[in-house]
Amino acid sequence: MPEIILYLLNQDFSNAALTDDEARAVLEYPAYWMFCWASGQVLARHLLDNPDPVRGRRVLDFGSGSGVAGIAAAIAGAAQVIACDLDPDARLATRCNAALNNVEIEVRDDFEAITEPLDIILVADVLYDRENLAWLPRFLDRAPTVLLADSRIKDFSMPGYTRLGSRLSTTWPDLDEHNEFRQVNLYRGSA
Ligand SMILES: C[S@@+](CC[C@H](N)C(=O)[O-])C[C@H]1O[C@@H](n2cnc3c(N)ncnc32)[C@H](O)[C@@H]1O
């Protein structure tokens, strides 16, 4: 995506087997922000090609990771972008990546503490944790529109959400994920 530049894991990351301690540490505190996930790329590309839903709008990027979706919204002309992530390192990565792209993004840790009015919520690759499914109806209480990108759930069905289409993408740096996770579905939620 030529419009956006991100601080991510180096492409030449080591493929050496992890020790048990290293594997445990990675699983306990995954550094999701080090990757630009396939779903984040598809959502960012969609916003850059179709800016109308975010232009002049108040946007929230839920589970921002590197910040790719929020950065795309800001480049596409959003009036305000808030990024929310549980992980302090992801919040730092979002701040750094916003600065790298010369865009303004406010960063928060707790979705429920966000009180500002929102026009649209962006959600990319958070449904690997099925507990996050519970947020989808609640997003529609907070904003009239949700754009959701996901490659993890194949039989996705949720009241208020309709599928817009799908695109092939690859998490970057390439994690060599199964092909099924390269097929990203894009959904619109409407209140
Ligand atoms: C796989 S990454 C996706 C990052 C980015 N959206 C992308 O597509 O590249 C998932 C991110 O969502 C964050 N996350 C997961 N559940 C969350 C929750 N309930 N609230 C806020 N952030 C969450 C994780 O910390 C992680 O940074």
Image: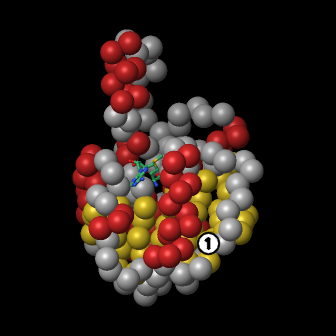
Could you tell me which residue is drawn at 50 percent across and 76 percent down? Answer: 141
Total numbered circles: 1
Q: Quadrant of residue 167?
A: bottom right
Could you tell me which residue is drawn at 33 percent across and 15 percent down? Answer: 21
Could you tell me which residue is drawn at 31 percent across and 60 percent down? Answer: 110
> For this rendering, which residue is in front, 66 or 191?
191
Dot 1 crowding, Cα within 10 Å, few <14, some 14–19, many 20+:
many
Q: Position of residue 87 (x, y in %)?
A: 31, 47
Q: Quadrant of residue 62?
A: bottom left
Q: For residue 7, say whether it is visible.
A: no
**Residue 74 relative to residue 126: left or right:** left
> For this rendering, which residue is in front, 171 or 138?
138
In the depicted structure, whether residue 146 falls above or below residue 14: below
Q: Position of residue 145 (x, y in %)?
A: 55, 77
> For this rendering, which residue is in front, 187 or 39?
187
In the depicted structure, whether residue 30 falls above or below residue 158: above
Q: How is the image coloured?
A: secondary structure
Q: Position of residue 88 (x, y in %)?
A: 26, 49
Q: Residue furthest bottom?
A: 56
In the depicted structure, whether residue 143 falls above or below residue 92: below
- Ligand 1 is within 8 Å of the C-beta of the residue at disc 1: no
Give the quarter of the figure containing the C terminus: bottom right
Secondary structure of the residue carrying numbered label 1: strand
In the depicted structure, whether residue 55 falls above or below residue 164: below
Q: Name the residue beneath numbered marker 1.
A: 189
Q: For residue 130, say whether it is visible.
A: yes
Could you tell me which residue is drawn at 42 percent across and 75 percent down? Answer: 59
**Residue 34 relative to residue 95: left or right:** right
- Hey, what amino acid is under mark 1? Gly
